[in-house]
Image (tube, grey):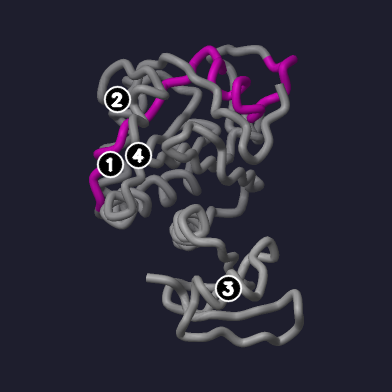
Amino acid sequence: MTLRINSIAPDFTAMTTTGQIHFHDWIGDQWACLFSHPKDFTPVCTTELGYMAKIEPEFTKRHCKLIGLSIDPVENHSAWAKDIEETQGARVNYPMIGDTDLHVAKLYNMLPESDAPGAERTAATNATVRSVFIIGPDKKIKLMLTYPMTTGRNFDEIIRVLDSIQLTSVHKVATPVNWVPGQDVIIAGSVSDEEAKQLYPQGFKTIKPYLRVVAQPK
């Protein structure tokens, strides 16, 4: 199955470091950020998991749950978590999936279907398991990103995107290049000038008929 923006996020049951979960039930009425890793005890991923542990409160404020994934078993995750806390200064409290049979990785198109599981697998073998998904309360995929092995992910950017997605899911606006919360936004093209005047009585700026800028709605 090819996943796209607004596809229903594939549901699954999996064992994690906090016990077995049924993914859609686990999300509940919140948002979720699923981020995957090629293997435990790898250097770039160690820094990523540690940073996510540090900024987990930022996701919590946005009603977004974090969940990590690696193809190694859960018991390895627990041992790795000790290294993460020691080297990165943050304790991993969010669940980490043990995807030893690659079931979740294949559901989310992280690995070619022809790849076979096995204890001999290396981080290089699992190269495409470097993905991030943001999933809404409606269980639909809102964002998909896949990074190369040697490039650590920018999770501050994931928070920025989450802010944009949550804002634009409520208001008829879009966010411009490099937008950060508090900056002006763009009125959606589906909104007529008459409707825009009703929605934004404080006024808006028309740069071009297709480019109308307004202060970020509260």
Point 37% across, 70% down: residue: 218
Disc 3 residue type (three-letter) = Ala
Task: Classify the position of the N terminus by image quarter.
Answer: top right
Whichever of labels 2 and 4 marks the residue nearer the N terminus, that label is 2
Marks 2 and 3, Cα distance to the nearest angstrom?
48 Å
Instruction: Indicate the secondary structure of the residue bearing disc 1.
Output: loop
The range drawn in magenta is 90-115
Question: Are the residues tagged 2 and 3 within 8 Å (C-beta)?
Answer: no
Rate crowding at label 1 as few (under 14), some (14 to 19) or many (20 or more) other CA atoms within 10 Å: many
Marks 1 and 2, Cα distance to the nearest angstrom?
10 Å
Whichever of labels 1 and 2 marks the residue nearer the N terminus, that label is 2
- Mark 4 = which residue? 30
Disc 1 residue type (three-letter) = Val
Point 67% across, 85% down: residue: 206
The reply to whether residue 81 is visible in this rendering is: yes
Circle 1 or circle 3, nearest the eye: 3
- Mark 3 = which residue? 196
Marks 1 and 3, Cα distance to the nearest angstrom?
45 Å
Rate crowding at label 2 as few (under 14), some (14 to 19) or many (20 or more) other CA atoms within 10 Å: many
Rate crowding at label 4 as few (under 14), some (14 to 19) or many (20 or more) other CA atoms within 10 Å: some
**Horizontal arrangement in the rendering, residue 189 relative to residue 172 (left or right):** right
Q: Is residue 72 magenta?
A: no
Camera-side residue: 195 or 110?
A: 195
- Mark 1 = which residue? 92
Marks 2 and 4, Cα distance to the nearest angstrom?
20 Å
Whichever of labels 1 and 3 marks the residue nearer the N terminus, that label is 1
Question: Are the residues tagged 1 and 2 within 8 Å (C-beta)?
Answer: yes
- Mark 2 = which residue? 17
Instruction: Indicate the secondary structure of the residue bearing disc 4.
Output: loop
